[in-house]
Image (cartoon, helix red, strand yellow):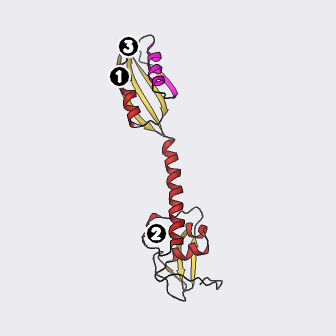
Amino acid sequence: MTPQNDVFDLPTGATPVDFAYHIHSEIGHSCVGAKVNGNIVPLNYELQSGDLVEILIQKGKKPSPDWLSFIKTTLAAAYIKNALRAKNKNLLNKIAQTGLELRIITKDRPGYLKDVATAFTELKINIVSVVSQNDSKSAFVTVVIKCGNLEKTKLEKLLFKLKKIPNTREVNYKFTR
């Protein structure tokens, strides 16, 4: 039961997390602890009949995948799985926002950047930015190109095309945020 004397019927072995989700999904999501009969208990504590349960919450808290190992109700499991899917989807969106930075070292020659742009165009890759840096002590130029994240096969094709451009000495890449 709650401190307001609301009674919830839960299965044997139910935990404070099961209890929190029976009150409301947001209470369950933001659950950080519980007091049972006035004592702080772990979230995997098995509730007994007649226990007075108070849920401790924290704004912005999200459910943990570990909770799925000890909860007993299908209601709590459904809410936790949905929240984890949403969290993973947000994570995937952030990963998709990462990009690729290519660093090409080449011998300076007219038309080189046009050849590089053609390689990107043929593979239908959008270039976000291009910076060309001349080294006054040598005849080499460093070209830094930023683009969106690429699938492995597309990246391999791009690297192959860039290395085939005449006067290309070196091509390196790294993933950026």
Measure the C-alpha gap from mark 1 to mark 2: 50 Å
Pinpoint residue 125: horizontal percent, then vertical percent. 48, 29
Please, is residue 93 above or below residue 81 in the view? above
- In this view, the residue in front, 38 or 111, is 111
Range of residues picked out in magenta: 111-131
Q: Which of marks 1 and 3 is in front?
A: 1
Residue pointed to by mark 1: 163
Residue pointed to by mark 2: 67
Q: Nearer the viewer, mark 2 or mark 3?
A: 2
User: Which quarter of the image is occupied by the N terminus?
Assistant: bottom right
Q: What element carries label 3?
A: loop
Q: Earlier in the sequence, mark 1 or mark 2?
A: 2
Q: Is mark 1 on a helix, strand or loop?
A: helix
Pinpoint residue 113: horizontal percent, then vertical percent. 46, 17
Identity, as a three-letter code, of the amino acid under mark 1: Lys
Measure the C-alpha gap from mark 2 to mark 3: 61 Å
